[in-house]
Image: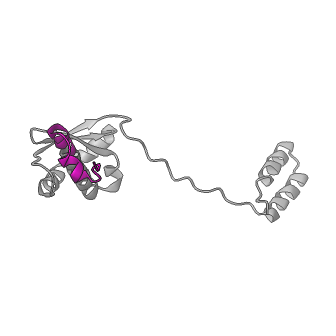
């Protein structure tokens, strides 16, 4: 017997309850795409769609500041969701603040600047002539970061 390999074949091969769950998951995926496509990127990354009940979509945000910004977009977002293919009739948004619910993306870490051997030699010379022992030691530590070739 061959195992199902696609979402569609898996949903057809499973019991009805699991099939409904998979359809709901796909529906929420479409809603998430619509939200990310409509909202500004800075706001969309702090919003996550949740359950749909009684024509109301729960949207989770990770702070009250993002909830406030989302409330400004709510009327237009509802219209977008109503027109978006694959989504049910949504008439209301329920915005729920859940601090720490989402992983924050790590800030972009810039690579360290490379210190040339020539600049390291200049730092060693400056350290040798510095009057302050603390400044001299700091310059020596900095010079040790030179790239070795």
Quarter of the image holding residue 143?
bottom right
The number of numbered badges drawn on the structure is 0
Q: Is residue 41 left or right of residue 104?
A: left
Assess whether residue 2 is covered by the magenta stretch: yes
> What residue lies at 17% left-to-right and 39% top-to-bottom?
15
* 28 left or right of 140 in image: left
Q: Closest to the observer: 33 or 104?
A: 33
Tell me the colour scheme of the image.
one colour
Q: Quadrant of the C terminus?
A: bottom right
Asked whether the viewer can see residue 112, the reply is yes
Specify start and end residues of the magenta stretch as a single range. Answer: 1-22
Tell me, yes or no, if residue 72 can be seen here. no
Spot occupied by residue 84 in the image (x, y as percentages of width and height): 15, 57
In x, y percent, where is residue 90?
A: 11, 47
- Residue shown at 35% from the left, 49% from the top: 45
Q: Residue furthest right?
A: 128
Placement of 145 over or under 66, stated as above or below: below
Residue 67: name its quadrant. Answer: top left
Q: Position of residue 116 (x, y in %)?
A: 76, 63
Of residues 25 and 8, the one drawn nearer to the viewer in this rendering: 8
Residue 33 location in percent, x, y? 26, 54
Q: Is residue 63 left or right of residue 149?
A: left
Magenta highlight on residue 141 = no
Front-lying residue, 19 or 141 = 19
- Toward the front, the furthest residue is 1
109 to the left or right of 138: left
């Amino acid at each position: 017997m061959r195992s199902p390999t696609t979402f569609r074949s898996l949903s057809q091969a499973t019991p009805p309850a699991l099939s409904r769950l998979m359809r709901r998951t796909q529906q929420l995926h479409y809603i998430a795409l619509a939200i990310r496509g409509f909202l500004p990127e800075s706001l969309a990354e702090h919003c996550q769609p949740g359950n749909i009940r009684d024509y109301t979509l729960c949207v989770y945000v990770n702070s009250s500041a993002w909830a406030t910004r989302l409330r400004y977009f709510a009327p237009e977002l509802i219209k977008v969701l109503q027109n978006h293919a694959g989504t049910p009739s949504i008439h209301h948004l329920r915005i729920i603040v859940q601090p720490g619910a989402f992983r924050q993306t790590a800030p972009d870490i810039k690579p360290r600047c490379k210190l040339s051997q020539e600049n390291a030699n200049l730092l060693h010379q400056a350290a040798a002539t510095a009057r302050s022992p603390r400044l001299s030691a700091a310059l020596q530590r900095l010079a040790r970061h030179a790239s070795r070739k």
